[in-house]
Image (cartoon, rainbow, N blue to C red):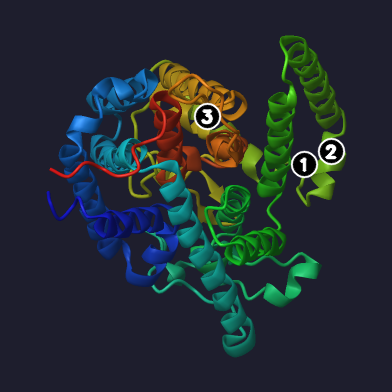
Amino acid sequence: MTFLARPAVRWVWLVLVLAVLLAGDAIRFTVGWTVFGILAVLVGIVAALILVADRRTWRVRDLPAPFVAFLALATLSLAWSAYPGATALGLLTTWLIAIAAVAIGLTVPRARLIRALAAVIGGVLALSIVFELVVATIIRRPVLPLFPQPGVDYSQYETIPKMLYWSRNELFEVFDEGRIQGILGNANNLGFLALLGLIVFALAAADGLLRRPVAITGVALSALTIFLTRSATVTVALVAVLAVAAAALAMRRAATPRARTVTWVSLLAIGAAGISAVIVLRETLLGLLGKSSDLTGRLGIWDAVIALAEQRPVVGWGWVSFWMPWAAPFDDLAFRNGVRQLQAHNAWIDLWLQLGLIGVAVFAALVISALVRSWTTAVDRPQHLAGHPEPYRATALLPLLVLTALVVQSIAESRLLVEYGWALLIVMAITTKRGDAPAEAPRP
């Protein structure tokens, strides 16, 4: 326990946890699922030990009630699961991520979390650009992962689908509908990580948490990666993040109750007008984003998942997190371009399938409560212990902007239920409920 109290050890653990969560695909493609699984279990065990070591600094009531309820519901679903083996494995990963995220939320100060996120995201983005450069200039052909995804057999294809490649060798084709995938092997995930980087580096620059050249480089690298990935989901999420940030800053400037009322009404009117415009112009906007009317095959997947969810609408088929390709019905549920899908490409439809309407309601309570608290954290002026108002901090916007990005992503991807999505949701929900963690954990 004394060893775990050292700041350097805590820093290494935090960076390693974030690397496993944010760059899990890169690790799995490079060293395989077995090594990744061992690494994930180890960081989860260390997270549990950290929670024990810091047990005097937190209480169970610091955890949001919907979070506890959701974990309980997912665990209880083992009793009615149609695939108990897959549910047991899914629960293991869900609990490991939850324990690590709880340890971060309860013991890591926001400033340290931002620096660690900047380090990991900056590293992933830089390595991704270098990786794509090497592929485009030296290898000069698409590259397959060293270790394929579970259930994937390349020999079954006459022509391997582009979706299965680690890199498609499209760096020099970005002006002709090409997209880079980076070390994550997925343009959408890499683009979303770049959006997180844009948030983190911008807030760190505003509050002076990083040296200005480092922060500016991080912002530029994040913006470049967003452009190179050409993800429609990330583009929409970026617009939403900018809009929410502008709204929060406008509320900060409203110093009187009357000014706040006027600002609220103005924001609601602008929001309603924006939503109406999106509904009316949806076909045009999809065309501008390079998406077909079926959202690149997502509508077909949603129809298949909804049809299955309607057979068990209340409690679902059982929690599974990532779909297990060897377990029915996931072995033959959804395909795109001949590739088996391991998610519903919509977190809420996925939830309905796995935990029914009860699961959707509990999870929605977790998300909505976290969003409400993150808004309060972002717009309310902080108070000194003596009751005097303190200056606003840019980093107070972090939970609001990250949650906004995750919610938008949840419409087209199921990442909110797994890995970095699930972990960041937990961290933001905890930190907005109990406040920032102490700067240093007390020594045993």
Under mark 1, the amino acid is Ser
Question: Farthest bottom residue?
Answer: 138
Q: Is residue 437 left or right of residue 111?
A: left
Circle 3 SS class? helix
Circle 1 SS class? loop
Q: Is residue 82 visible?
A: yes
Q: Is residue 296 left or right of residue 201?
A: right
> In the image, which disc is placed on residue 331?
none
Task: Please state the horizontal and vertical placement of residue 330, each as a whole percent of the image.
Answer: 41, 42
Q: Is residue 413 left or right of residue 288?
A: left
Q: Residue at left 59%, top 51%? A: 192
Residue at the spot of label 2: 283
**Circle nearer the N terminus (2, 1):** 2
Q: Are marks 1 and 3 in contact (CB under 8 Å)?
A: no
Residue at the spot of label 3: 348
Under mark 2, the amino acid is Glu
**Circle nearer the N terminus (3, 2):** 2
Q: Residue at left 41%, top 49%? A: 112
Circle 2 SS class? helix
> In the image, which disc is placed on residue 293?
1
Q: Are marks 2 and 1 in contact (CB under 8 Å)?
A: yes
Label 1 environment density (alpha carbons within 10 Å; few <14, some 14–19, many ≥20): some
Gap in angstroms between the C-alphas marked 1 and 3: 20 Å
Task: Please state the horizontal and vertical placement of residue 4, each as a whole percent of the image.
Answer: 18, 52
